[in-house]
Amino acid sequence: MSLINELLWATFGLFLTIGGTFLGAVLALPHFHSGSWGLQTHSLNVSYQIGAVLLVGCLGGRNAGALAQTAYILLGLTGLNIFNQGGGMEYIHKPSFGYLLGFIPAAWICGHLAFRHLPKIESLAFSCLCGLGCIHLVGVLFLLVAYPSGWLKDLAGASLLDLVTRLSLIQIPGQLAVMCAVTVVAFTLRQMMFY
């Protein structure tokens, strides 16, 4: 992929990640009520943020994905309120910051694996699953180092287990649903773009 294409995908990924941060993921299911069919939405209790990280990796490749997420983190640390709970340098003391750091290697891994073979639904799903796993691995490792060192602030008495449960275990089911949607979208778009 040319440098211009990678920069375009990185820019697209940056804006997609910012937008996905503030857009709650929902599941729309058919619903029959009062004699007619409709769609009923159910919140997945996660945003599309991680979906954006994985999608840019699947479509733009490893370099564009990592560049987009690096730019996202740097912009958030400069004070733009683009993270889930604001922005600024003090964000590095939040328990969720390690998960944000995980976006960079996750997008790289997802993009690397997504372009190793011709796009198939299984290979794209695997690349997304590896990316999602990377986010949680980096996030949990950050907690394991930062929690006992006193680096984290505003914990409100939460234990390390409470943080891992809240930031990883509770989030994973909704994120897996978003990952499945990303896989289908990435597969469809890759087929349409003929690469």
Image (cartoon, grey):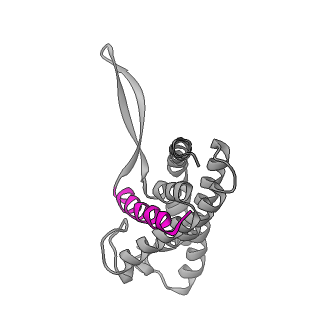
> Residue 194 or 72: which is nearer the viewer?
194
- Residue 152: percent from left, percent from top: 47, 80
| Res 161 quadrant in image | bottom right
Whether residue 158 is visible: no
| Res 39 quadrant in image | top left
- Residue 96: percent from left, percent from top: 47, 70
Magenta stretch, residue numbers: 1-22
Furthest residue in direction right, as rendered: 117
- Residue 149: percent from left, percent from top: 55, 86
The N terminus is located in which quarter?
bottom right
- In the picture provided, is 44 more to the left or to the right than 80? right
- In the picture provided, is 133 more to the left or to the right than 104? right
Compared with residue 69, is residue 175 higher up or lower down, i.e. above or below?
above
- In the picture provided, is 17 more to the left or to the right than 143? left
Say whether residue 14 is magenta. yes
Compared with residue 193, is residue 132 higher up or lower down, i.e. above or below?
below
> Residue 40 or 132: which is nearer the viewer?
132
Determine the residue positioned at 37% across, 83% down.
89
